[in-house]
Image (cartoon, rainbow, N blue to C red):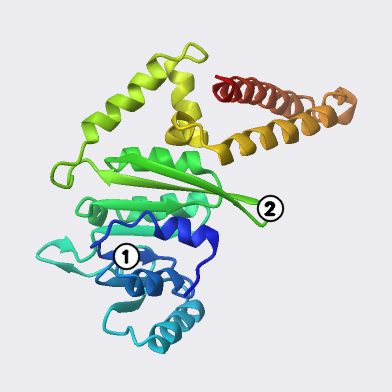
Amino acid sequence: MELSKRLHMVASMVEKGSTVADVGCDHGYVAVYLIREGISPHVFAMDVNAGPLERAREHVERYGLASYIDVRLSDGLSGLPCRGGRPEADTLLAAGMGGRLTVKILEEGVDKLSGMRWVILQPQSEPWLVRKSLRNAGYFITDENMILEEGKYYAVMKAVNLGNLPDGFPAGRLKEEERFFFRNRPELSEEEWEQAGDRYGSWLLIRRHPVLFAYLKDCLHKNDSILNGITGLTEADGRPDKTGKRLTQLEEEQQLLKRLLTLYTE
């Protein structure tokens, strides 16, 4: 089965041998791919909507994978079974949902997340909310990737449970690498770097990801267009407070974008 670039990017983050809970599995393409490629021994394909879940079941049966993929109607992680007090999947995968819905899944599934090892997320919006929620759940982001597909930017993040680390996993070294990079950058304060990391992805910035570069330039251009459209507004428009606040936010964001883009000129 050939996945889209976006779904392939997500699936490529899964650790070989991991049992995956694919929440919001839609038609089950990733679940089928993970089994057929020998990446996962078992996948729980879960969705809150019966229609897409039935399509997933059809795909699973078409490929003869019903023994390897457990298709379940589930709101978030609620339908994931546990054995001996631990969830039967060690990896949560959630792709294609809005940032706030992704956060809701993390927060409502926090008990099961504490017993899992990996989280792979590809939020469609507000990724900064997702990154903050991962920290609150005791997870540390270890990897990120970004693509441009059919005119849209998609970013994926992979995080490890600091309370359930794989044997020998260098979480301390990764944390120090992240801290060292931002500590030695004079362009922004430590607080500003944290905000930039939440908004755009620390590892994408550290590695000067080429697609992030295009995204930052695109954001700069779009913000310029918005700024040009609202700077002429006055109190006669009846929106002075709201417009002024938005104008300040955009100007601050523009300054941040310009400073982040200097990373690519070194």
Kindly identify the residue that appears in the image at 78 percent across and 28 percent down: 227
Q: Amino acid at mark 2?
A: Gly
Residue 142 in the figure: left or right of residue 228: left
Kindly identify the residue that appears in the image at 22 percent across and 30 percent down: 172
Of marks 1 and 2, which one's residue comes earlier in the chain?
A: 1
Q: Is residue 147 above or below residue 95?
A: above
Q: Amino acid at mark 1?
A: Ala
Task: Note whether residue 22 is visible.
Answer: yes
Q: Secondary structure at mark 2?
A: loop
Q: Secondary structure at mark 1?
A: strand
Q: Which mark is residue 21?
A: 1
Which one is in front in this view, the residue at disc 1 or the one at disc 2?
A: 2
Task: Note whether residue 96 is visible.
Answer: no
Residue 74 in the figure: left or right of residue 168: right
Q: Is residue 134 above or below residue 184?
A: below
Q: Is residue 34 above or below residue 92?
A: below
Q: Which mark is residue 151?
A: 2
Q: Quadrant of residue 194?
A: top left
Quarter of the image for the C terminus: give it.
top right
Q: Position of residue 2 (x, y in %)?
A: 50, 71
